[in-house]
Amino acid sequence: MTELRLPLYWDAFAPDPHSLRAARVRDAERVLRAAGRARLQVVLVALPLALGRDAVLPRFAIDRNGRGPRCLTEQRVVRGAPRDPFTDALLQEALVRHLERLGRAFANHPALAAWEVTVGVTDLVPPPDVAAATELAALLAGALRRTGDPVRWTLSSRECLQDRGLHPADLAPLVDELAVDTTGAARRLGLAPPLPAGDPAPLPPPGLPTFLALLASDLARTRVQPVGVAVPVPPATEVGDGESATGAPAADEGAVLGWSRTAWRALRSLAGDGGRVGAGPLLDAGPRCAELPLFQARPRRRWLGLLGLDGAPKNWARAAATALGAEPGGGDGEPDGPDPVDSPPVPALAGLGDPQVFFATPDAARDLVGPWLEAFEAWRTGSATPSRG
């Protein structure tokens, strides 16, 4: 790894609209110093407003009589729904001032790679129109751009696949980098149909993270980095008789390794020389996290880490590192695959057309993904065949 993403949750850092918690600032500073000693760069996510399907907000940003996503404050469920950041002027002022305070606290830190403004801001509350969404994005990005550090914005998969009022092409001029979080893409594209209770959750198509990055790039007219690629694999100590401690069937190790090699080889080909490829959480969540609302709702999220509870890299993470050319060997005694740098380019995305028409056309993304995944399968077969010299 060369870079870590560290989310600075608003509810943890802001006890009120007027200040930052000094203890949380010191915690983040310790992470930055430790990363610097390890020669890692850190991306600080300034406004990670969502955790799964929940909103993570301080109490003053919650409408106690509202209806909408479930709200969490300091890992407790709070009655109400998120206040509307697109129309509530006082909330907008609180958001901007919070980002300005964070900027002053960490600006120009030697271990800081970039500020990431937010992730999927329209997923919690849909904006009334494109103008309101773009205006809020400009306010938030502008508050961090004043630090002089690079600024990134991360789109959710929903914001790429559906018209949420915040278009990638409108965001691109506001920030230095764009990224897309692939979480939920398989479900929204109809590639993860509901399963009977007790059946294992299927792995998404290995080309899906690359498809999302290509789609977002074409919509934004600039390169977009995919993030959030992970596989839920519980540790061996939590698995018995083919079932994990969560009651869900254990993942098939061979399938996970094969998926990882293919998915990351494609991402490496897409990124090209010098490009970055994002992964999922660094660590599994420990036993004390099992009772938290996020993991009660989605137990599999406890096992998304690249490293297990013992700190050792998981086999799928080693397979990913091999596909990226960062580590020899495929993990768990697997042989090396072909050099990912020598893989042919992944297939281009054809048929997108005008982004405005794309967003106005129901199921436009589903119409694109089928033919592209067929072309990806041909690419996978060809790139997995060692060249003969």
Image (spheres, rainbow, N blue to C red):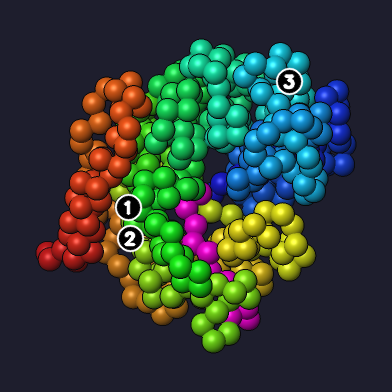
* Left or right: where 172 falls relative to 84: left
Q: In the rendered structure, which amino acid carries the disc numbered 1?
A: Gly
Q: Give x and y (percent) for residue 167.
A: 43, 24
The answer to whether 252 appears left or right of 91 in the picture is: left
The local crowd at label 1, few if under 14, some if 14 to 19, many if 20 or more residues have their Cα within 10 Å, is: many
Q: Residue furthest bottom?
A: 241
Q: Which numbered circle lies on residue 91?
A: 3
Q: Is residue 217 magenta?
A: no
The reply to whether discs 1 and 2 touch (Cβ–Cβ < 8 Å) is yes
Give the residues drawn in magenta, as a range.
228-239
- Name the residue at 25% across, 51% down: 373
Question: Is residue 146 in view from this perspective?
Answer: no
| Quarter where residue 19 is shown | top right
Residue 175 shows up from this direction: yes
Q: Which residue is mark 2?
A: 262
The answer to which quarter of the image holds residue 133 is top right
Please, is residue 149 above or below residue 25 in the view? above
Above or below: residue 9 compared with residue 104? below
- Pick the front one: 17 or 8: 17
Q: Secondary structure at mark 3?
A: helix
- Tell me which label, 1 or 2, sits earlier in the chain: 1
Question: Magenta part mainly helix, strand or loop?
Answer: loop
Q: Pointer 2: residues within 10 angstroms few (<14), some, or many (20+)?
A: many
Cα separation, mark 1 vs mark 2, equals: 8 Å
Mark before the other along the chain sequence, 3 or 1: 3
Residue count near mark 3 (Cα–Cα under 10 Å), binned few <14, some 14–19, many ≥20: some
The residue lying at 38 percent from left, 71 percent from top is 255
Residue type for callout 2: Thr
The residue lying at 73 percent from left, 20 percent from top is 91
Q: Which residue is mark 1?
A: 207
